[in-house]
Image: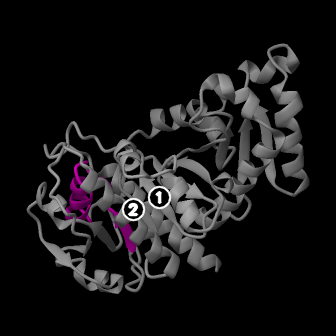
Amino acid sequence: MARDPATPLAVSLGDPAGIGPEVLAKCWDNRDRFELSPFVAIGDPRAIQAVWDGPIATIEDPREADSAFDVGLPLIQIPSPEEDRPGHPSVAGAHCSLDALEIAVGLARSGSAAGVVTGPVSKEQLYSIGFRHPGQTEFVAERCGIASSNVVMMLAGPTLRTVPVTTHIPLRDVPDELTAGLIESRGRTTLRGLQRSFGIAEPRLAITGLNPHSGEGGLLGRAEIEVIEPAIAALRAEGWRVTGPHPADTLFHETARSGYDAALCMYHDQALIPVKALHFIDAVNITLGLPIVRTAPDHGTAFDIAGEDRADPRPMAAALRLAAKSAIHRSAAA
């Protein structure tokens, strides 16, 4: 992959007691095999040293990351007031993870980093220090001056990309939350994101129905007729290539996937189950609608295995590769 020495990726380590430090260190160890471009880690060096005995190249300017990348894992230090033990999260570690995230976003916004890759954090620990966002996505959006309602979460794997219209709400609330306006907004952000971050000039979006068999013409529910179809018509009127509403049970087999670039799904599991079934290891969480590139591996802190040398670095490697490719697409389109 082509390297731009001026703009490495900025990677927040996440919770220092989780597996973020371990998987990122393993990514550096396997940087050639994983075909990774330069990145700089941001966090407490002791969190890395607790799980890895490789070389760390401490830097202050992200532009130093390229020359340091083959010497050691480039790191911008954020010393924590307390040393975290793997598998034992703390308030001090939560402060450290939040500071790392803040700095990584700032570097990307200033152009000093090509994008942000966020390591896994503990929401419970963050909430204990006053964090008021549902997750890192909303925090990043706010720091970028974008309303959280205007960004979307895409799960992107090698053969399937999906976006949920509604995310972390009870299933019983989904029908009441769905509106034509919400579907239009999510669809528009997805289509523009496919252009900007994936380099697809004329993206194709498939939109699912909500009910079994997309409602069977109203016999199994009217959401398709009253909400989803008007949204599809509005997007088509803008010139977008949009199809649906498709029955979700026939949309994700190999032949069907060849007919679209992303699927817009009505609720969380409708979007995430097919991606995780096909690409459990290499699916990446990418946030669309931001002025910067932001990706994340699709796993949590895994405190139960932290420090045991059991964490798989491939999801983090996939997040790093996609962030680098997205940054290249954005740069080419600028």
Residue 11 drawn in magenta: yes
Q: Residue furthest left?
A: 53
Residue 145 percent across, percent down from the top left: 62, 68
In front here: 85 or 162? 85
| Amino acid type shown at disc 2 | Leu
Q: Does residue 243 appear to the left or right of 281 in the view shown?
A: right
Quadrant holding the C terminus: bottom right
Q: Which residue is mark 2?
A: 320
Q: Determine the secondary structure under disc 1.
A: strand
Q: Which residue is mark 1?
A: 295
Task: Evaluate if marks 2 and 1 touch, with contact meaning CB atoms under 8 Å apart.
Answer: yes
Residue 86 versus residue 166 in the image, above or below: below
Q: Residue at x 80, y 15 (%)?
A: 220
Q: Residue at x 29, y 68 (%)?
A: 41
Q: Residue furthest top?
A: 219
Quadrant holding the N terminus: bottom left
Residue 280 percent across, percent down from the top left: 41, 39
Q: Is residue 49 visible?
A: yes
Label 2 or label 1, whichever lies nearer to me, is 1
Name the colour scheme.
Answer: one colour
Q: Residue at x 18, y 77 (%)?
A: 57
Q: Is residue 114 visible?
A: no
Q: Does residue 201 appear to the left or right of 198 in the view shown?
A: right
Residue 167 percent across, percent down from the top left: 59, 38
Residue 185 drawn in magenta: no
In front here: 280 or 188? 188
Q: Determine the secondary structure under disc 2.
A: helix
Range of residues picked out in magenta = 9-31
* Quarter of the image where one finds residue 333: bottom right
